[in-house]
Amino acid sequence: MKKSSKLAGVTALLLLTACATVITAPDLAHNAAQDLMDFKASFNEKGIAKVDRLNQSELQNNCSDYAQKEMPAELRAQLEKTELDAVKFPADGQFLGNWKEGEKIAQNGRGLQFSDDAKTVNGGNCYACHQISKAEIAFGNIGPSLSEYGKLRGGPSEDLMKYTWTKLFSSHAYNACSVMPRYGAAQILSEQQMKDVMALLLDPKSPINQ
Ligand code: HEC
């Protein structure tokens, strides 16, 4: 008799514990904040890769909030305008560098990783997401194919050069929550490297436009 009442007590305690973990609607916001803290705590700093990389910009924060639902058009337009206004065009007005260097940059996925040192020159890793030169058969397809990019758009007009530079500088300027890296805004590529990649895409002599 004594034994069974003790057992009942244990069962009641277990039930109570179970009730305490039921998530109610007002708790959800708290849980999201807690989840973020747990997520951050599960990362270790290693080499040049510091945990502050997990801190979101205002834009990224907004994109996370609207990941599962449509972002209001007004907010989207405002985020894109902020990115667009911050684009820096080449100081000397020249958009096109050397396509041969551009191909190397597009192929290069090194830089900014924990195993790289701070002096590693960053690549663009464009092939991770795009087809570019037809000679390269290893490419990802998260982004659209860029082969014949300049040729299909009628050659390197001023408008096309400005559009492409802007897309490279901050992909969010035309698509608020784009997954494409912000090569200029996040200082991943230098101005010269961006010019070289531009030449790969737009120079009529570049093999991708043949
Ligand atoms: C993580 C994937 C990813 C990487 C890496 C990436 N891109 Fe993109 N890119 C995209 C996606 C996705 C789009 C289309 C949707 C959008 O705008 O976000 C795109 C769009 C573009 C466009 C516009 C195409 C058009 O028809 O208007 C250009 C130009 C471009 N990328 C060039 C590059 C270059 C050059 C590099 C390397 C320096 C690069 N991208 C690296 C994902 C990527």
Image (cartoon, rainbow, N blue to C red):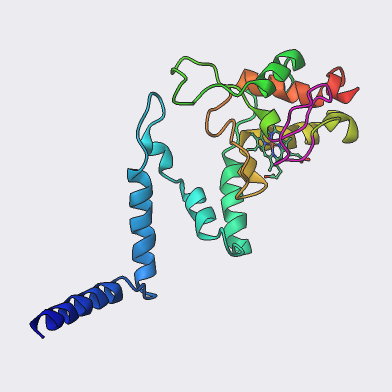
Q: Is residue 203 above or below residue 85?
A: above
Number of on-image labels: 0
Instruction: Tell me residue 188's x, y (percent).
Output: 55, 27
Task: State which quadrant residue 33 falls in.
Answer: bottom left
Q: Position of residue 10 (x, y in %)?
A: 18, 75
Q: Is residue 141 magenta?
A: yes
Above or below — where is 173 with respect to 100?
A: below
Residue 156 shown left or right of residue 34 in the figure: right
The picture quadrant where one finds residue 147 is top right
Q: Residue at 63% of width from left, 62% of height from top?
A: 73
Residue 189, image x and y in percent? 58, 24
Q: Main secondary structure of the magenta part?
A: loop
- Point 26% across, 77% down: residue: 15
Residue at the spot 22% in from the left edge and 77% down from the top edge: 11
Image quadrant occupied by the N terminus:
bottom left
Q: Quadrant of ligand 1?
A: top right
- Quadrant location, the C terminus: top right
Q: Tell which of 3 and 80 is nearer to you.
A: 3
Residue 43 lies within the magenta run: no
Farthest left residue?
2
Q: Residue furthest bottom?
A: 1
> Where's residue 88, x and y in %?
60, 31
Q: Which residues are magenta?
A: 129-145
* Identity of the residue drawn at 33% across and 51% down: 37
